[in-house]
Amino acid sequence: MIRTRHILLFIAIVLGVLVEAFAQVAPDSKLYRTIAELDKEYFDAYNECDMETQARLLNEDLEFYHDMGGVSTDKDEVVESILQNICGKVSRELVPESFEVHEIKDFGAVAMGYHKFFNSEEPDAISTPSRFVVVYKNDNSTWSIYRVISLH
C-alpha cells in the first residue's frame, strides 16, 4: 500500500514537471506580448491588404502548409497568392482565448490557436474556427514568420 502511494506520488510529480516543461508562456510575459503583437501586426496588414508589411514579416525561407491548398515554400508566391486571392475579399479574426505561445529555446517561439475568416463576397457564410500553428524565428532580435500550418 505504501509502495503504491509512493509510485503514484512519483508519477504525479513527473507528470507535473512534464506539463510545466511543455506549458505555454504566461500571457503577461514579454515573449507572449511580443508574439501577440506580431500576430496582430501581420493580420492587421492581411486584413488591410498591406502587402509590404506582410512581406516584411515573412521569413525568406518561409514554409506554408495548408490542409486544403498544399505546401508553399516560396515567400514571393505566398505574398502574390494573398494579393490575388485574399485582398479585399477575406478578413481574419483571432479567437483570443485560444491563443498560446510556446518558447523554442535559442530559436524563437510557436504560436497556436484558432481564428475565423470572413469572406466579404459571401457575407452570410458561417465562419467556423480553424486551427493555426506559426513558428516565429528570432534572428538577432528580428522576428519573422518562419513556418505556418493552417488547418480548416
Image (cartoon, helix red, strand yellow):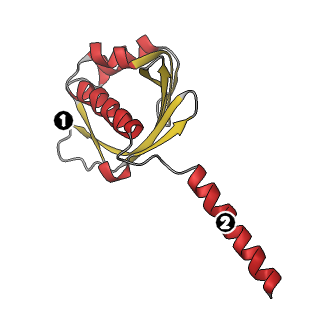
> Count of labels shown?
2
Q: Is residue 145 above or below residue 95?
A: above
Question: Alpha-carbon neighbours of circle 2 within 10 Å: few (<14), some, or many (≥20)?
Answer: few
- The amino acid at mark 2 is Ile
Q: What amino acid is at disc 1? A: Ser
Q: Name the front one of labels 1 and 2.
A: 2
Query: Who comes first in sequence, dot 1 or dot 2?
Result: 2
At a point 74% along the width and 81% down the height, the residue shown is 5
Location of the N terminus by quadrant is bottom right
Which residue, as the protein is rendered here, is positioned at the far bottom? Answer: 1
Residue underneath mark 1? 120
Q: Position of residue 123 (x, y in %)?
A: 17, 42
Provide the residue designation for mark 2: 13
Q: CA distance from mark 1 to mark 2?
A: 51 Å
Q: Is residue 132 visible?
A: no
Residue 136 lies, in percent from the top left, at: 47, 28
Q: Which residue occupies the foreground of this view, 102 or 52?
A: 102
Answer yes or no: do the residues labelled 1 and 2 have beta carbons within 8 Å?
no
In the image, 99 versus 131, the foreground residue is 99
Q: Dot 1 surroundings within 10 Å: few (below 14), some, or many (20 or more)?
A: few
Residue at the image point whose x is 46% and y is 17% from the top: 59
Residue shown at the point (48%, 48%) measured from the top left:
24
Above or below, 61 relative to 38: above
SS label for mark 1: loop
Identify the residue at horizontal 29%, vertical 30% (top origin). Answer: 43
Q: Secondary structure at mark 2?
A: helix
